[in-house]
Amino acid sequence: MILGVREHIGQNQRYAHSVRVARCAALLAQRHGLDSRKARLAGLLHDLARLYSNDRLIAESEARGLPVGTREREHPVLLHAPLGAAIAREKFGIEDDAVLSAIAKHTTGEGEMSPLDCAVYLADSLEPDRSFPERAALWELALRDLTEATRETVRLSAERRARKAAAAEARASAS
Ligand SMILES: [Fe+2]
Ligand SMILES: [Fe+2]
């Protein structure tokens, strides 16, 4: 394991999540004939910037020339993925593009996703501490088919987000 990851993350709970994601990603990689060492590394490092404040996420992303658009300004948490990849390179010496890509793409599951990107995205969404009802079935699917599992997981999390937004709106208009 890489030294200093726990210190950088700065919170035991988030570090424990990262270790679980590393294990799940390695397992999915093994199942699907991918490089499990790369999967484990990306899993361990995927949330390096997850606990940064919104201001810090924006400032550090801009300082590195990472794209910060309207969507990122509305939801700065999205930046923790690409910024995390930049920090993995700078601070932990990761030069492997496949590992950096999996870190950079772990939040949305959108766009062009390599099998390793999918494995890390799914490990993050489906690690054992996640508690939504479809988790176990999606994990079973991920063991069989990374692409299908990614599609389903992206679809379900979009649904969950929409439900939450609708509920928040309903609460706001009721008050
Ligand atoms: Fe994350
Ligand atoms: Fe995560």
Image (cartoon, rainbow, N blue to C red):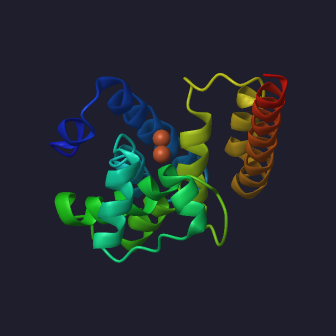
Relative image position of residue 104 (x, y in whole percent): 46, 62
- Residue 76 visible in the picture: yes
- Residue 116 visible in the picture: no
- Vertical relation: 129 (above or below) 81: above
Left-right relation of 76 to 3: right
Which residue is the extreme one toward the bottom? 65
Based on the displayed image, in which of its 4 quarters is residue 44 positioned?
Answer: top left
Based on the displayed image, in which of its 4 quarters is residue 3 positioned?
Answer: top left
- Vertical relation: 27 (above or below) 128: below
Q: Nearer the viewer, residue 134 or 59?
A: 59
Based on the displayed image, in which of its 4 quarters is residue 60 positioned?
Answer: bottom left
Q: Nearer the viewer, residue 108 or 97?
A: 108
Relative image position of residue 19 (x, y in whole percent): 37, 34
- Residue at 69% in and 44% down: 142
| Quadrant the N terminus occupies | top left
- Vertical relation: 155 (above or below) 88: above
